Image (tube, grey):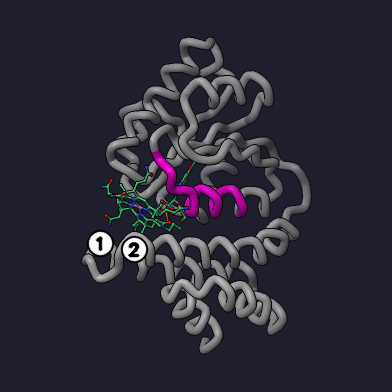
Amino acid sequence: MELLERISEELQNGNYIDVPKLTREALAQGIAPAVILSDALVAGMDVVGEKFRRDELFMPEVLIAAKAMQSAMEVLRPKLIETGVRTAGMIVLGTVKGDLHDIGKNLVGMLCEGTGYQVIDLGVDVAPERFVEAVRTHKPDIVGLSALLTTTMPRMREVIESLVEAGLRGSVKVMVGGAPVTEKFAQDIGADGYSPDATSAVEKVRVLTKY
Ligand code: B1M
């Protein structure tokens, strides 16, 4: 669809003024929020990531594309959430310590909210003790950990160990994700669930909470 391609292109150009406007236009045309998300925004960000990997784009361009994506996500968020009918459970979500990537985590959070879960987002660079504190305070069904760097993946194991030390591990399921994370890694660190993308993350959350 032409409009979705345009959104994707403008996102790649880092046009954070037009991307949310075009996103509103797509919604007004009746295009489903989930389609705008996957076929325009995530598709555009995938291209940015690939060009960054090939050194065809540099950090400032990636940052500005991320800003464009986030402005569009502000427009989509209420629409995605509208589809949620009831509270299915609670999730504490965060990007682990040392890691500032939050686009994927935010998507997972939004889709979970859209499915009816209450999401408490601790943000980025979250230390194990903050996850523990949040589990103690909010008593969520799931604590979700995101990591985008191979160097920050080990922080996930530390969160699980901290939950064990605090005597809270039995009361909460731990779910992990992020581009470098694998099913095997999740099993190795003793997580309860892993998923490669936001859509399957919601499915996994539903399995873990039996919803
Ligand atoms: Co960074 N970065 N980055 N970056 N960045 C990557 C991750 C990288 C792969 C790029 C590359 O080299 N090709 C590379 C990591 C290499 C590695 O570790 N092996 C990298 C690097 C090296 C870095 C820096 C170290 C660069 C530097 O400074 N030299 C630096 C680190 C900063 C830090 O965190 N301490 C850095 C910085 C940044 C920016 C700040 C510029 C920006 C982040 C902006 C932001 O998030 N607000 C950025 C970006 C945008 C990227 C890429 C290009 C895109 C990431 C993204 O948002 N993807 C990325 C390359 C890439 O991934 N192609 C890259 C879109 C998003 C929808 O996907 O986050 O994978 P993703 O999330 C998916 C799934 O992974 C999954 O669902 C999501 C939706 O489908 N998922 C979960 C995520 N969390 C989940 C949790 C779950 C379940 C599923 O359960 C709880």
Judge left or right: residue 87 versus residue 187: right
Expressed as whole percent of the image width and height from the top left, the position of residue 24 reads 67, 76
Expressed as whole percent of the image width and height from the top left, the position of residue 72 reads 59, 67
Cβ of mark 1 under 8 Å from ligand 1: the answer is: yes
Q: Is residue 101 magenta?
A: yes
Q: Residue furthest bottom?
A: 2
Expressed as whole percent of the image width and height from the top left, the position of residue 147 reads 40, 41
Quadrant into which the C terminus falls = top right
Residue 133 versus residue 100: which sits nearer the camera? 100
Residue drawn at x 25%, y 71% is 56
Picture layout, residue 102 above or below residue 191: below
Residue at mark 1 to residue at mark 2: CA–CA distance: 6 Å
Picture layout, residue 97 above or below residue 75: above
Over which residues does the magenta segment extend?
99-110
Task: Give the label on residue 53, or none.
Answer: 1
> Do residues under tags 1 and 2 come within 8 Å of each other at their CB atoms?
yes
- Give the residue number, with chain letter if any, for mark 2: 49
Cβ of mark 2 under 8 Å from ligand 1: the answer is: yes
Please rate how many residues cluster around mark 1, counting C-alpha atoms within 10 Å: few if below 14, some from 14 to 19, many from 20. few
Judge left or right: residue 75 versus residue 191: right
The local secondary structure at tag 2 comes to helix
